[in-house]
């Protein structure tokens, strides 16, 4: 299993970086759209859609919704200035606060949504839709001035999340004693969380020092900490829905890594939260 995870990581990481820096906005949007459609297909299982055809139609309809929203944006308007992107990004802040309460109160909170397939589908939309627009809004940021500014910012968020995940794993394995959320994800510990935040802080400092990022240091620090915490919440939230659905992985599309959602669960929270804070709340970049 470890061999497959390493091979897949060596393939996926360069592919992601290439997509960030080499694809034009339309190509990047199409790739992101494809990832979101696959994630929606997997979420259908978490929502209780047992039929493969139902999940396929769910992914198709959601993809058409995203495509329609993109087509209604005038070509001369940056994504961050239009309602199609702004509303989902603001909604992300509210949703992840709600998700925090659901995780903290689990399993009692499951009584509110377990029997409602429609509500679980709504949770999926609130997870994937803001992620889609957060990715596009950051990637397109100042694209007319410099084609790579947005790519650097997206890579920064990804490195931040990867640092948090890796640090939490290493510190948790070495020092973990106190469970973070035992009823949701028994393997996560408070020591791992602190270690993940320290690791992400070091990586973010080094990245921000040598990459062409331009933002007020204090604002960037605040947004980075919140995004790192959101990434942990994204992971815990997906774990909660998987536990309630009685499944280990959201899918089997990535060898050794499970499904698409299993790989981007942290990003689905971190990207829209970071985008909303930096672009809308603080207007920092």
Image: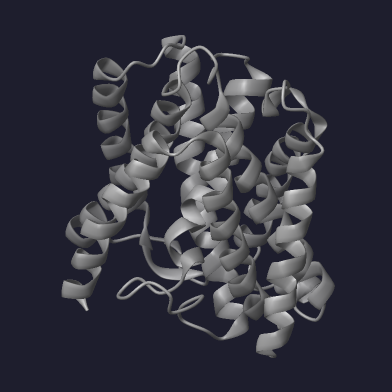
Q: Nearer the viewer, residue 125 or 225?
A: 125
- Residue 109 visible in this rendered orientation of the protein: no
> Can you say whether 117 is above or below 224 in the image?
below
When the figure is inspected, residue 238 is found, relative to residue 133, above or below; the finding is below
Residue 242 visible, this orientation: yes
Q: Residue at the spot x=47%, y=56% of the render?
A: 264
Please state which of residues 61 and 121 is positioned toward the viewer in this rendering: 61
Specify the quadrant of the image occupied by residue 205.
top left
Q: Residue at x 53, y 54 (%)?
A: 234
Q: How many marks?
A: 0
Position of residue 125 measured from the top left corner of the image (x, y, whole percent): 73, 58
The quarter holding residue 107 reads bottom right
Render colour scheme: one colour
**Quadrant where the N terminus is found in the figure:** bottom left
Quarter of the image containing the C terminus? top right
Residue beneath the point at 53% across and 21% down: 143
Residue 124 image position (x, y, % from top left): 69, 62
Residue at the far bottom in the pictured view: 51
133, above or below 110, in the image: above
Q: Position of residue 70 (x, y in %)?
A: 73, 42
On the rendered structure, is 116 left or right of 166?
right
Q: Is residue 125 left or right of residue 155?
A: right
Q: Is residue 53 left or right of residue 34?
A: right
Residue 73, compared with residue 169, is above or below; it is above
Taking the spot 72% from the left edge, 48% from the top edge, the residue there is 95
């Amino acid at each position: 299993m470890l061999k497959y995870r390493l091979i897949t990581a060596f393939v996926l990481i360069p592919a992601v970086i290439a997509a960030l820096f080499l694809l034009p906005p339309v190509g990047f949007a199409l790739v992101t759209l494809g990832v979101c459609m696959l994630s929606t297909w997997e979420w259908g299982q978490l929502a209780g859609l047992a039929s493969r055809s139902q999940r396929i139609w769910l992914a198709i309809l959601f993809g058409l919704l995203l495509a329609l929203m993109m087509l209604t944006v005038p070509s001369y308007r940056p994504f961050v200035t239009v309602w199609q992107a702004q509303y989902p990004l603001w909604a992300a802040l509210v949703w992840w606060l709600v998700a925090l309460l659901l995780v903290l109160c689990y399993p009692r909170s499951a009584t509110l949504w377990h029997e409602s397939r429609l509500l679980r589908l709504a949770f999926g939309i609130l997870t994937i839709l803001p992620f889609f627009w957060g990715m596009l809004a950051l990637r397109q940021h100042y694209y007319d001035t410099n084609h790579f500014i947005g790519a650097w910012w997206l890579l920064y968020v990804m490195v931040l999340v990867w640092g948090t995940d890796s640090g939490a794993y290493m510190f948790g394995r070495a020092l973990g004693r106190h469970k973070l959320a035992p009823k949701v994800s028994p393997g996560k510990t408070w020591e791992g969380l602190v270690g993940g935040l320290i690791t992400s802080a070091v990586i973010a400092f080094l990245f921000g020092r040598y990459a062409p990022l331009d933002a007020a240091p204090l604002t960037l620090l605040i947004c980075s900490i919140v995004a790192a915490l959101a990434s942990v919440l994204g992971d815990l939230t997906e774990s909660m829905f998987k536990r309630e659905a009685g499944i280990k992985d959201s899918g089997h599309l990535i060898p050794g890594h499970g499904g698409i959602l299993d790989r981007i669960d942290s990003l689905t929270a971190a990207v829209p939260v970071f985008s909303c804070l930096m672009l809308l709340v603080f207007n920092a970049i």
